[in-house]
Image (spheres, grey):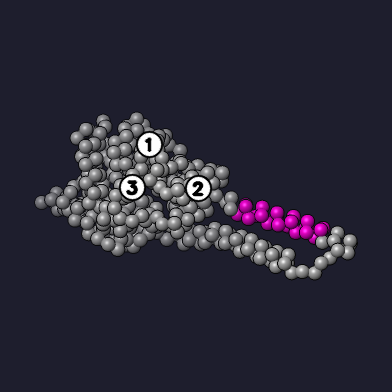
Amino acid sequence: MNGETLLGVVVPCYNEEAVLPETFKELTEVLDRLINEGKINRNSFILFVDDGSADKTWAMIDHRAEVDPLVKGLKLSRNFGHQSALIAGMESVSTCTDCLISIDADLQDDVHAISEFVDKFHEGCDIVYGVRKRRDQDTFFKKNTALAFYKLMAKMGVNLVPNHADFRLLSRRAVLELMNYREENIFLRGIIPLLGFKSAKVYYDRQKRYAGESKYPLKKMIAFAVDGITSFSIAPIKLVMSLGFFLVLVGCGIAVYAFLVWLLDHTISGWTSLILSIWLIGGMQLIAIGVIGEYIGKIFKETKKRPRFTIEEDTREVNFAEKEIYKHE
């Protein structure tokens, strides 16, 4: 029965005190409506994951969890990053829900699409992707760099869903399968399609951020793109190798040209070509070392097998303890 479906909504948060009151309001309204419509179990909940915020984010989550049975909280000991916060939330609810939905706290993703997600799940889909219809709210630069990133990843053989971020539904078996991917440098947008379960797409209009500042400035966007590329493809290393072969061929051509000039006695002393060659080849070498170093750095991190996150507080533990005390009384 649809009404037996226990849904968990995972919301990673980092310094979101400005938007949280509205996020609480909109998400609880959506869950209340789904419960009243009989689409989900009345024990469904929203888990807010505080990723080491420096503002009042956790205090607001903790207080709301005390007064609202729909709201739960999970506090990480420090800032581990958006992807790790998502994994922490998913892992903590993986065995106690039938399906979960991940959504950012900034309300740019349409919360009303959650109902369609649940409908697709009831139709037998294990994965439902939230896909933006268009990117009108993005700047010209962000829009075009994002499209370029998707095209580049496609050419490298990485199967991504264009215009999909981390707004998605996963069934319990999809989440449990995802937990088998233990790499530290995790790129969820690339891993989810690898699961291979039946999937569907729900299209929605992305809104402007309700309040607060974006947590993805240019520097983080570039780092995220580099992580995505190097986590799923060795194409950059192959490109460096191809570039090396090309430079060898260019060097052979220059050697032949120099020999012919020497035979014709047309040699001209000069340093411009020499300096340009040194700078060009030196730059290529540094780029090559940097690319290879990026992969070696990832290997170095993976071999340590450190935990991807550390949980400091969990409001659900209090609730469980209260239930146990009540049971024994």
Residue that label 1 marks: 203
| Residue 325 position (above or below residue 275) | above
Q: Position of residue 57 (x, y in %)?
A: 26, 58
Q: Secondary structure at mark 1?
A: strand
Residue that label 2 marks: 149
Q: Residue furthest left?
A: 329
Q: How packed is label 1: few (under 14 Cα within 10 Å), some, or many (20 or more)?
A: some
The reply to whether residue 46 is in sight is yes
| Residue 37 position (above or below residue 18) | above
Q: Which residues, given as a range, are shown in magenta?
A: 237-257
What mark, if any, has residue 208 been given in the picture? 3
Which mark is first along the chain, 3 or 1? Answer: 1
Residue at image coords 26%, 39%: 6
Taking the magenta stretch, the answer to whether it contains residue 314 is no
Residue type, mark 1 in image: Tyr
Q: Quadrant of residue 200?
A: top left
Residue at image coords 44%, 54%: 221
Which mark is first along the chain, 1 or 2? Answer: 2
